[in-house]
Image (cartoon, grey):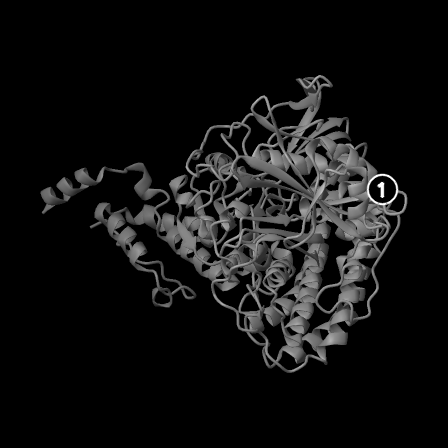
Amino acid sequence: MEVKNHKLATTKDMRPEEFKNNDYLLRMAEELNRDGAGIVLSTVDDVINWGRSNSVWSLALGTSCCAIEFMALGAARYDMARFGFEVTRNSPRQADLLMVLGTITYRMAPLMKRLYDQMAEPKYVIAVGGCTISGGPFRKGYHVVDGIDKIIPVDVYIPGCPPRPEAFFYGMMQLQRKIKMERFLGGRNRKEKPEDGETKREEKA
Amino acid sequence: MTTEEKIKQWCPQAGTETAGETVVHVPADRLEDVCRRLHDDAEEPMDYLRDLVGVDQGEGCLSTYYQLESSRTGSRVMLRADAVEREGRAMLPSVSGLWKTAEIKEREAYDFLGILFTGNPDMRRLFLREDWNGYPLRKDYDMDSNPLDMGNEENADVTEEFRLMPDGTLERRENVVFNPDDFVVNIGPQHPSTHGALRLRTSLDGETVKKIDPVLGYIHRGIEKLSESLTYPQTLAFTDRLDYLSAHQNRHALCMCIERAAGIEISERAQYIRTIMDELQRVASHLLFYSCLVMDMGALTPFFYGFREREMILDIFEETTGGRLIQNYNMIGGVQADIHPDFVRKVKAFTKHMREIIHEYHEIFTDSVIARTRLKGVGKLSREEAISLGATGGTGRATGWSNDVRKRHPYALYDKVDFKEIIYTHGDSWDRYMVRMDEILESCHIIDQLIDNIPAGEFRVKVKPVLKLPEGVFTASVESSRGEFGVFLMSRGDKSPWRLHFRSTGLPLVHTMDTVCRNGKIADLIAIGGTLDFVIPDIDR
C-alpha cells in the first residue's frame, strides 16, 4: 500500500526515450522497487535529489588531454552551467563527483585513491576518455593503470580520445538521472541483504 | 675547420658514424674534455645542449647521445659516448657543470637506462617511483616486473652523488635537498594551477621561496618504450598526446624525421597545409595560454575571451581533420585528408577576426594595473641562464635568446614566408607573456601569406603501410607552441624503431622553475609557472 514505484527519472528536459543507455538504470529501479519506500520519505527524496542532481560539484582530476576539453565545457560556447556543473572544486572535501580526466599512471593511482577516499558520501566517479576506461593507447605500457575501475568504483564511463563536449554532457546527464533515482533517505537506513528481501516477499505472497 | 675536424684534433681516438646523421663517437674518458672545449670554443661555442639521449645498444652496451648547438651560429653537432662498466654499474662522466639542463636530462637517462653520471649532484630517479626495480628502456627489461603498488611513496630528502676519484675508485656522497628544519610546502600533483599532474616541493622562508624540487612522473606513460614495439605509422599517434596543445607540430616533427630517413619527398600542397595547420595550432595554444594565465591570476572574464576565439580554430580543425583537440592529421608522406572546401574562407575570416579583436584582450588584461604589477620584473631569467637550462620557446625569446627553429633551421615553408622572430630582453614574466601575445599576430601574418597560394596537387604521396627505415640515427626538430620539439630516431633497419626519443619542450622549462622562482614570493610562483607555459604530459611522456 504505502509503496511508491521507482521509475526512470522523467523530467521535461530528460525523457528516457531520449537516452540510449536505459537498461542499467532500469536494473537499478528494479532493485529499488524490491524493497519499496514510504510515500512521504520518497517524496522528500525526490526533492532532495532534484537539488542534488542539479548542482553536481566536480573535483576535476585532470592529468592530460581530456582536461582541456573539460575547460572548453566551462567556457561560453558549451557552458556547463546550464546543467549545474559549473562549480568545479579543487578540494575533495567540497566535491560530489570525481571527474577523472586523463591517463592514470602507477605513480598517480595511490593519489587518486586517496582523493576518492577524502570525498564525502554520497560521491560519484566519472571516467572520461579511453585511458581511464582501459588504459587507452598506453594499455601495454609498464606504468599505466588499465582501467581506473580496478581501483575505485566508476558510475559513468565517457569514451573518446578525448570525448567531444556533447559526449561529456551525455555522460554527465546520465549521472544526473542516476542521482535522481536514488533514495537519499528511504532505502539507505533499512538496507537489507538481497537474500532477506527475497524471503520476505515470498512470505507476503 | 668543421666541428668534427676540431674534435678529431683534440681527441684523435674519436670516430665518426655516418649512417643517417653524422655522429662523433668520443671515448668516455675523453668526453668531459671534448665537451669543455666545445662549450668554450671562441668562434663557435656549443653552449646549448639540445638533448641528451640514453640508448641501449644491445649486448650490454649503453650509450648516450649529446645533441649540441651553438647559440651564436646555429651549427649543430652530435656526440656519442659509450658507458664504461665500473663496480658493476654503467658509468659516464656528467656534463652538468657545463650545461645546467644536463642535471635533469642525466637524471632521465639514469631513470630509463641506469647509466650513472659521475659528478651529477642529483642521481635520483626522475619519472618512476624511488623504489622502482630495473630500468624500463633497457632491452632486457621485464614489462611485468613492477606491478601496481598502491602504497604511499616516500620521497627522500637527500640525493646521491657519485664521484670518480683519481685512483679509479668511486666515492658516494649525499647532497641535501631539504634540511629537517626547512619549511617544505607541497604543491600538487592535484592542484588547479599546476596545469596537470605536476608536483613542486617548495621550501619557504616566510613567504620567500628558498628552493623548488619538482617531482615528475605522475603522468609518465612510457611512450618511448611503447614505440619500440610498434610500426612507424603506429608510433605517430603518440605524438599528439604528448603536448596536446602542439599536436600538429609534434606530429609534423616525427613525420618529417621518418620522411627524411626513408627519403620520401612530400608534395608542395602538403607542405602548405602542414605549415598553416602548425600556425593555427600555435595561435590556439597561445590563446589557451592567455586564458589559463589570467585564470591562475584570479581573473575570469578573459578566460571566456580566449576560448571564444579558440573555438573558431577548433571548428576549422574539426572540419578538415575530424578532431578538435587531437587531430591525428599529419601522416608519413603528407596529410591524412585534403582540406575542407570551406577551409580557406574560414581561415581568412579567422585571421581577420583575430586582428580586429585582440585589442579586447589587451584592454581587459594587458592594460590592467594588476597584471602589470604582478608580471613586470617578476621571475627574471637571464639569457645565459636560459641557454644553459635549454629553456627554448617563448621563455628563451623573452630573455633575448633568438632560438626560433623556424628561423634558425627552417623546415616546411618557413624559409619562404616573411615573419619576425619576437624577441624581448628583460626575461621576466611580463616579457614571456608579451612574446606569446605578439606571436599570435605573427602567426596570423604567416597564415595570410600562405592561405591564398595553396597549390593544387596531391595532399599525400603513396607510402607503404609497413615501412622499413635504413640503419642509422635520424633527428628532426620543429618549433612547437612552447619551444623546440625534437625527435631522435634510431633505426636498425627494422619496421619499428630501435629507439625513439622525443625532446620534451617542458622538461627544461620545469627545471627552470627553481632558478626563476628562487628568492621570489610564493604568491608569484603560480604566475611564473603560468608564463613558462609547460604542459605536463609532454614533460613526462
Q: Which residue is mark 1?
A: B384
- Where residue B361 appears, as percent x and y from the top left, is 77, 61
Q: How many marks?
A: 1
- Give the side of residue B285 with respect to residue A148, left or right: right
Mark 1 Cα shell of 10 Å, populated few (<14), some (14-19), many (≥20): some
Q: Quadrant of residue B248?
A: bottom right
Q: Is residue B332 above or below residue B401?
A: below
The amino acid sitting under disc 1 is Glu
Q: Is residue A180 above or below residue B341?
A: above
Query: In this orientation, which residue lies closer to the viewer: B529 or B305?
Result: B529
- Give the side of residue B156 with respect to residue B355, left or right: left
- Where residue B133 appears, as percent x and y from the top left, is 49, 30
Looking at the image, which residue is at 50% across and 31% down?
B134
Looking at the image, which residue is at 50% across and 54% down?
B496
- Where residue B141 appears, as percent x and y from the top left, is 47, 37
Looking at the image, which residue is at 67% across and 71% down?
B271
- Where residue A38 appears, as percent x and y from the top left, is 28, 46
Q: Is residue B198 above or below residue B367?
A: above
User: Which chain is mark 1 on?
Assistant: B
* Res. B300 visible in picture: no
**Secondary structure beneath disc 1?**
helix
Query: In this orientation, which residue lies closer to the viewer: B326 or A17?
Result: B326
Q: Quadrant of residue B510?
A: top right
Q: Residue furthest front?
A: B12
* Res. B475 visible in picture: yes
Query: In this orientation, which residue lies closer to the viewer: B467 or B381?
Result: B467
